[in-house]
Image (cartoon, rainbow, N blue to C red):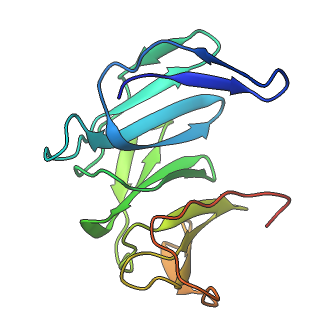
Amino acid sequence: GNKTEEYDPATDSWRYLKDMPTTRKGCGAAVLNDLMYVTGGQKAYGEPGQPSMHRYNPTADVWDSTSAAMPFEQYVMPVTACGGKIYAGCSLYHPKDLAEYDPTANSWYVIANTPSLECTALCGYDGILYAFGGAQDLNKVYSYDPSAKTWEPKTDMPSGRMGAVACLSNGL
């Protein structure tokens, strides 16, 4: 849909914020420098993904569309922030399409030699991007070093995951 909602754990309450400028089903979002970036998704089921990206400022309750569009159309994909950049891609139907967004340059860079990361969970830690699981290789883990532009296989997960999510907590 296009609704934006905010949860406050201190008061255990929800409130509606300004609606997104467009409907997005199966989109992804990441927070960078206290701004939320939302990209991908479909306007309606059966339609192609949307490459546009919108940025939300929660302090001002304002959406804008000044961010550059992704280099491909995807939905049901992971999106995460890492090292001052946003990473999006590797959806179910585009397992090797991953791109890096630089908000300073307002531009995307398509990452070469991406392993097949279909429906993978992404998470950044200490400037390195980690990819977990996926439809084809459910238990695989890879790291991506943006400065060297290289992928490295890591120790497999004990059990496989497809469409999982990942987050960083206390360095883990």
- Residue under the image location 59 percent in, 9 percent down: 60
Q: Please state which of residues 14 and 92 is positioned toward the viewer in this rendering.
A: 14
Q: What x and y, as percent, mark residue 24?
A: 32, 34
Q: Is residue 62 left or right of residue 125?
A: left
Location of the C terminus (image quadrant):
bottom right
Q: Please state which of residues 32 and 150 is positioned toward the viewer in this rendering.
A: 32
- Vertical arrangement, residue 14 with respect to residue 135, above or below: above
- Residue under the image location 39 percent in, 80 percent down: 115
Q: Is residue 20 left or right of residue 73?
A: right
Q: What x and y, as percent, mark residue 118?
A: 36, 71
Say whether residue 144 is visible: yes
Say whether residue 106 is visible: no
Location of the N terminus (image quadrant):
top left
Q: What x and y, as percent, mark residue 36?
A: 54, 31
Q: What x and y, as percent, mark residue 142?
A: 54, 80
- Residue under the image location 23 percent in, 52 percent down: 72
Q: How many marks?
A: 0
Q: In this view, does 125 lie to the left or right of 111?
A: right
- Which residue lies most toward the top here? 60
- Residue under the image location 44 percent in, 17 percent down: 63
Q: Please state which of residues 168 and 15 is positioned toward the viewer in this rendering.
A: 15
Q: Where is residue 146, by image quadrant?
A: bottom right
- Which residue lies most toward the left here? 47
- Vertical arrangement, residue 20 with respect to residue 165, above or below: above
